Image (tube, coloured by chain):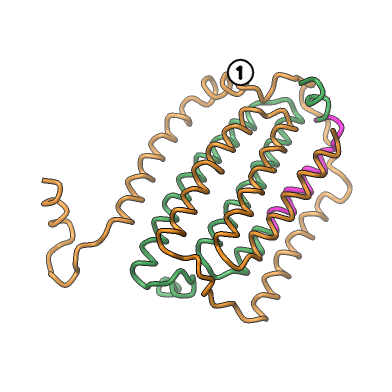
């Protein structure tokens, strides 16, 4: 069982590097999907079955499809991205490496934590997560629906085609006419 | 089922911590490395996921479902964030006909 963890870890790290280094955005999206699927494998190894399902549905099912749609609709697949200068790229890699080094140095002596509770095999199943979600976290759960509503309205407002600015009318006026 | 729950105990918690550190650093370096806005958004997703993995690992280690509920909320926020981010990207493509972040320098000062 233990080797599965290292297999999934290797897949996720390699595909994450490929996300950053791929020339075409489509290849980046595919590599990111592979990375997310391996992270779902990690969740299953952690006995977090609910999270694994939600992760596959939300990330690989919804978010990555959204990315793919935007790339295809805007025709971004041509890799005409102007590359940064060599100094900037080296600085970016060094910044990431130094950040990693700092984090690793913080835990170099191990974590030395004892579990707060006795091991419970039921944690992470739908039942335990659902009980926790709808008892302790009911209010945040309801508030998150408002967050979604505002995100949806905001995305519609942002992506809506603007009426021709040269007409000199306020932008709200034609929108109201269209609704009527 | 029982094999899986015993497997949690065999992998040390530190290895999950190291893995999520590495993923987070790759995401951070990628966000600095690239100029394409859509790839910067993907690197943000990568960083979100490394944090989620760490939270889920600690939650499983402590046998406390609250951490996994927290991951659930982070997923909700990430979904809302990526929706608005992609809408901004569509706007940007329409207005300046480019997805290069360096084009968005009017907000710099």
| Magenta part, dominant SS | helix
Query: Residue A169: x, y in percent?
Result: 12, 65
Q: Residue at x 67, y 70 (%)?
A: A92
Q: Residue at x 83, y 29 (%)?
A: B7
Residue B109 seen in the current view: no
SS for dot 1: helix
Q: Quadrant of residue A84?
A: bottom right
- Percent across and percent down for residue A121 are 75, 20
Q: Chain of mark 1?
A: A
Q: Is residue A110 left or right of residue A154?
A: right
**The C terminus of chain A is located in which quarter?**
top left
Asked whether A82 or A132 is in front, the reply is A82
Identify the colour of chain A in the image.
Answer: orange
What residue range appears in magenta?
B8-25
Q: Nearer the viewer, residue B76 or A4?
A: A4
Above or below, comparing residue A102 to residue A34 in the picture: below
- The x, y position of residue A21, in whole percent, is 66, 66
In the rendered image, is residue B66 in sight?
A: yes
Question: Is residue B72 toward the left or the right of residue A7 in the image?
Answer: left
At 70% across and 19% down in the image, what residue appears?
A: A122
Residue A80 drawn at (x, y percent)? 51, 75
Circle 1 residue = A127
Q: Chain B shown in which color?
A: green
């Amino acid at each position: 069982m233990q080797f599965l963890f290292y297999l999934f870890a290797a897949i996720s790290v390699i595909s994450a590097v490929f996300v950053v280094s791929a020339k075409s955005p489509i290849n980046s999206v595919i590599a990111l999907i592979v990375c997310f699927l391996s992270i779902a494998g990690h969740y299953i190894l952690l006995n977090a079955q609910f999270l694994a399902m939600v992760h596959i549905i939300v990330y690989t099912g919804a978010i990555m499809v959204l990315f793919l749609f935007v790339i295809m609709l805007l025709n971004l697949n041509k890799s005409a991205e102007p590359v940064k200068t060599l100094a900037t790229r080296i600085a970016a890699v060094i910044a990431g490496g130094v950040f990693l080094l700092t984090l690793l140095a913080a835990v170099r002596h191990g974590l030395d934590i004892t579990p707060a509770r006795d091991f419970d095999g039921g944690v992470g199943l739908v039942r335990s997560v659902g009980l926790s979600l709808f008892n302790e976290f009911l209010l945040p759960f309801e508030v998150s629906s408002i967050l979604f509503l505002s995100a949806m309205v905001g995305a519609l407002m942002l992506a809506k085609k603007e009426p021709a600015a040269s007409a000199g009318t306020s932008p709200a006026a034609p929108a109201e006419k269209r609704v009527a | 089922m029982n094999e899986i729950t015993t497997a949690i105990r065999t992998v040390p918690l530190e290895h999950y911590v190291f893995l999520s550190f590495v993923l987070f650093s790759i995401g951070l370096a990628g966000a600095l490395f690239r100029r394409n806005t859509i790839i910067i958004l993907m690197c943000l997703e990568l960083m979100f996921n490394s944090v989620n993995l760490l939270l889920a690992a600690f939650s499983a280690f402590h046998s406390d479902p609250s951490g996994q509920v927290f991951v659930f909320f982070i997923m909700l926020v990430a979904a809302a964030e990526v929706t608005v981010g992609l809408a901004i990207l569509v706007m940007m493509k329409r207005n300046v006909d480019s997805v290069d972040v360096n084009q968005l320098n009017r907000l710099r000062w």
